[in-house]
Amino acid sequence: MSQLTTGCPNCTTKFRLTPEQLDAAGGLVRCGKCMTVFNASDHRIAAQQESSAQPEDRVHLPVMTELLHREFSQQQTPVKNNKPSRIFPQLIIILVGAILLAAQYSYFFSRELSQTEAYRQPLIHFCHYSGCTVDPFRDIDKLAVRQFAIHSDSNQPGALTVDLIIENRALFDQPYPKIALQFSDMENQLVAERVFLAEQYLQNDTESLAAEPKLIPRGTQRRVVFSLVDPGAQAINYSVELKR
């Protein structure tokens, strides 16, 4: 295969390349030493100049490789991929994975999602087919204590009776909330606190327990009476808070 010699106009480094390489590169090459791009034909070294060079110079002339001239080639033939496309099966796998992930999230976090209006209705449809349950919607800010008193229990020595009225101001029925009680001393230092679930403070209220689920109808009030152990003589102040 015949070769020709060209020289870099910037650093005078000489290169050997074949006519085929020169044609494929459109005449443009990049110097491997100083990275200058130049037209190889315009800086071609004549045969007599090349022959006058020292033998050792000709031996060590670098060959212009295919990698260099491919950078400028506009005649590259695209490589055909004969393998069948895997994009569609991959999309199916991703879609199935996303559905399973959403189903798991809905199952384990159904209680939290059911209290968000944007997710509640889709969650109800999902549970209709999956068999899960959706907690009743609640807005703790729409529940208020209208009457609250604590006094000694005449029937149980060492016990106190809690008597309060809870009003549901929402436009929908709500579950009974948790009732948090705090007792403090004269310096307003906390002495005792306790949180009662609806199942605990309604256990003696057969009328409330008869309705399933335990809900306070909208726009109504419900009286709650239950007993607890007296936290002691230091507990002279008390407060109540409704919690979700």
Image (cartoon, rainbow, N blue to C red):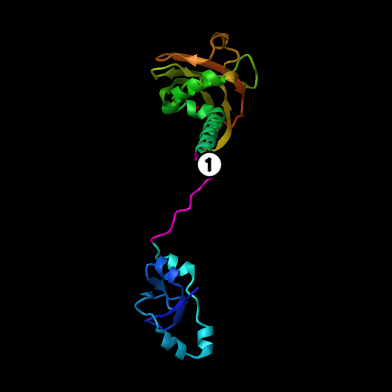
Q: Position of residue 84 (x, y in %)?
A: 53, 41
In the rendered structure, does residue 82 fall within the stretch colored magenta? yes
Q: Position of residue 86 (x, y in %)?
A: 53, 41
Question: Residue flagged by tag 1: what amino acid is it?
Answer: Pro
> Going by the image, does 121 lie left or right of 84?
left
Residue most extreme to the front? 1
Q: Main secondary structure of the magenta part?
A: loop
Measured along the vertical axis of the image, is residue 26 above or below residue 165?
A: below
Q: Position of residue 243 (x, y in %)?
A: 50, 28
**Residue at screen point 44% across, 86% down:** 50
Q: Position of residue 172 (x, y in %)?
A: 41, 17
Measured along the vertical axis of the image, is residue 204 above or below residue 229?
A: above
Q: Residues within 10 Å of mark 1 (few under 14, many from 20)?
A: few
Measured along the vertical axis of the image, is residue 125 above or below residue 184?
A: above
> Could you tell me if residue 111 is visible in this image?
yes
Residue most extreme to the left? 42
Measured along the vertical axis of the image, is residue 175 above or below residue 7?
A: above
Residue most extreme to the right? 157
**Nearer-the-camera pick, 191 or 13:** 13
**Nearer-the-camera pick, 183 or 92:** 92
**Residue at screen point 58% across, 9% down:** 206
Which of the 4 image quarters holds residue 200?
top right
> Could you tell me if residue 133 is visible in this image?
no
Q: Which residues are magenta?
A: 74-87
In the rendered structure, does residue 228 fall within the stretch colored magenta? no
The secondary element bearing badge 1 is classed as loop
**Nearer-the-camera pick, 226 or 5:** 5
**Residue at screen point 61% across, 25% down:** 230
According to the picture, the residue beneath numbered tag 1 turns out to be: 84
**Nearer-the-camera pick, 30 or 213:** 30
State how many labels appear.
Answer: 1
